[in-house]
Amino acid sequence: MFKTPKGNWKLIFICLALLLAMTACSGNGGGNKPGNKPVNTGSEADPGKNAETAGDEEYAPEEGAKLVVWEAKEQLEYMQQIAKSFEAEYGVPVTVEELAGGQQGGRLATDGPSKLAADVLTLPHDQIGQAAKAGLLLPNDLFEEETRATMVDAALAASTYEGVLYGYPKSVETYGLFYNKDLMPEAPKTWDDVIKFANSYNDPKQNKFALMWEFVGYYTYPFIGSFGGYIFGDNNTNPEDIGLNKEGTIEGFTFLQSLRDILPMKAGDVTYDVKTQLFQEGKLALNIDGPWSVAAFKDKVNFGVVPLPAAPNGKPSISFSGIKSYYVNSYTNYPIAARIFAHFASSKENQLKNYEMTGAIPANKEAGESPELQNDPIMSGFFQQFQQSVPMPSVAEINSVWDPLKAAFISVWDDPKLDVKQTLDQTVKTIKADIDSK
């Protein structure tokens, strides 16, 4: 990285960069159309503006660049420090605006074309398909090679749409098994261990339960993926191939039904608030949850976090994972500066800083293997489970899956005599009908 040279060299550099940028634009069609991967594209208003040559490995922000970054409340203090560091190094002022993570994609869609959206924002990976198709994101082209070399594979896959890498992976997350060490000193490794413990511990009249998790597709995916099942074919990218009524998923749902005795409650009664309170009170021994809940239990429970119990076939339980990455707004006036900031914020050093300040698990391979994280008895459990996870599907059709899948989980759980195959056949019909209607 370097800053823009001063004096006459500065003028020469800018002129040369503009000349090369115009040449590049004439060769790539001059647009930010979804699926394009031009190294030298700029903003939609001025494609190629101030871009350097494709062969260069170092880039400088545009003259007079200034950036706006959206960040969620829980990451605000961290991002403010990153913004100060970036301005100190590159001379580009960065304004950090608070906006909840779940709202950033929608705001980009409405405010991007009118130039009111942030230059850089964070999206969960299941939102990038729609954003990329709408032409709202610039590809991660200037730093693609370095990004691919330094980030975990799952994060790269989740930040890519139709073969184009858009994201600058920031953090990864999945759920693991919280266990109360006072109730269960040694964490269970298999479902047999859980069943054996539940038979001696459960006492519904005293609100004492061995294990709880929420009955939604995200948390119950291990009963699909761990048994060889899948939602969409081709690694969850092909909605024409729905696997929810095929052999692996049927086996997983059948096993789920067999667990009814270890949690004698209706699925709808197992909510986040219920299980969080019971775990805090020392009445729930095992809780499937994510790193976002660690703060709720610190100083209240003597707990640890380990990977999920192995499936009956002896294979590791496969969870769903989420990947958060920085993305560059395609309507930014400063496409080079915005790219540089996204790359800067996602560096190994800054991911470790994020982990230290907020507990976010790094997507950078070296950061994830650092002693700071590996020696953390809580976060290392999530990182181990992440290595046995698959990213949630990012194709738009996944939105047709969540409600029918949740209904299937609840039905199978609440009625152990229900025919699993028939239930899943109907679930797939419902999903297909919804996809076809859009």
Image (tube, rainbow, N blue to C red):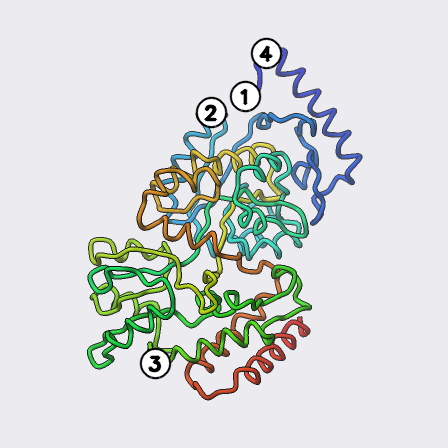
- Mark 2–mark 1 CB contact (< 8 Å): yes
Identify the residue under disc 1. Answer: 3
Identify the residue under disc 2. Answer: 89
Residue at the image point whose x is 27% and y is 60% from the top = 186
Identify the residue under disc 3. Answer: 261
Which numbered disc flags the more N-terminal residue, 2 or 1? 1
Residue at the image point whose x is 75% and y is 39% from the top = 30
Dot 4 amino acid type: Gly
Which numbered disc flags the more N-terminal residue, 3 or 2? 2
- Name the spot of residue 187 as percent of width and height, x first: 30, 60
Callout 4 environment at 10 Å: few (<14), some (14 to 19), or many (20+)?
few
Which numbered disc flags the more N-terminal residue, 3 or 1? 1
The answer for how far apart the CA atoms under marks 4 and 3 are is 77 Å
- Mark 4–mark 2 CB contact (< 8 Å): no
The answer for how far apart the CA atoms under marks 2 and 1 are is 8 Å
The answer for how far apart the CA atoms under marks 4 and 1 are is 13 Å
The answer for how far apart the CA atoms under marks 3 and 2 are is 59 Å
- Name the spot of residue 237 as percent of width and height, x first: 64, 60
* Residue 66 or residue 205, whichever sits in front: 205
Dot 2 amino acid type: Glu
Q: Secondary structure at mark 3?
A: helix
Which numbered disc flags the more N-terminal residue, 4 or 2? 4
Dot 1 amino acid type: Lys
Classify residue 110 as left or right of residue 321. right
Q: Secondary structure at mark 1?
A: loop
- Mark 4–mark 1 CB contact (< 8 Å): no
Which numbered disc flags the more N-terminal residue, 4 or 3? 4
- Mark 4–mark 3 CB contact (< 8 Å): no
